[in-house]
Amino acid sequence: MTAHYQALAETLKKRIEVISDTELRDSNPQQQLRQLQQASESIQAWHSAHRGNIPSQLNHFLQQSSLSKALDYLESEGLI
């Protein structure tokens, strides 16, 4: 399952990076929205596929779209 968690962590990091990219937001907001949508869809797809096999706290963070908390959880629990 660690490889699956690593894939989730990478997608969470990517979405957080895109949100923080003010240069992209200012120069090409449509591209930023596309990247955010793509990352969000990947996170949702991962969550749907693994929902029954993940810790309840991680499930909660993903349901609430608490992406930084989800990433922190993966790191603090040694899952990635």
Image: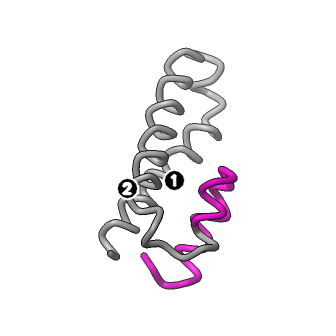
Number of labels in the image equals 2
Q: Quadrant of the C terminus?
A: bottom left
Residue span colored magenta: 59-80
- The label on residue 31 is none
Q: Nearer the viewer, mark 2 or mark 1?
A: 2
Q: Residue at x 43, y 59 (%)?
A: 8
According to the picture, the residue beneath numbered tag 1 turns out to be: 12
Quadrant in the rendering for residue 56:
bottom right
Q: Which residue is mark 2?
A: 49
Image side of residue 44 versus residue 6, left or right: right
- Judge whether residue 78 is colored magenta: yes
Dot 1 alpha-carbon crowd within 10 angstroms: few under 14, some 14 to 19, many 20 or more: many
* Mark 2 or mark 1: whose residue is earlier in sequence: 1
Locate residue 42 relative to residue 37 in the image: left or right: left
Q: Helix, strand, or loop for circle 2? A: helix
Q: Position of residue 74 (x, y in %)?
A: 53, 73
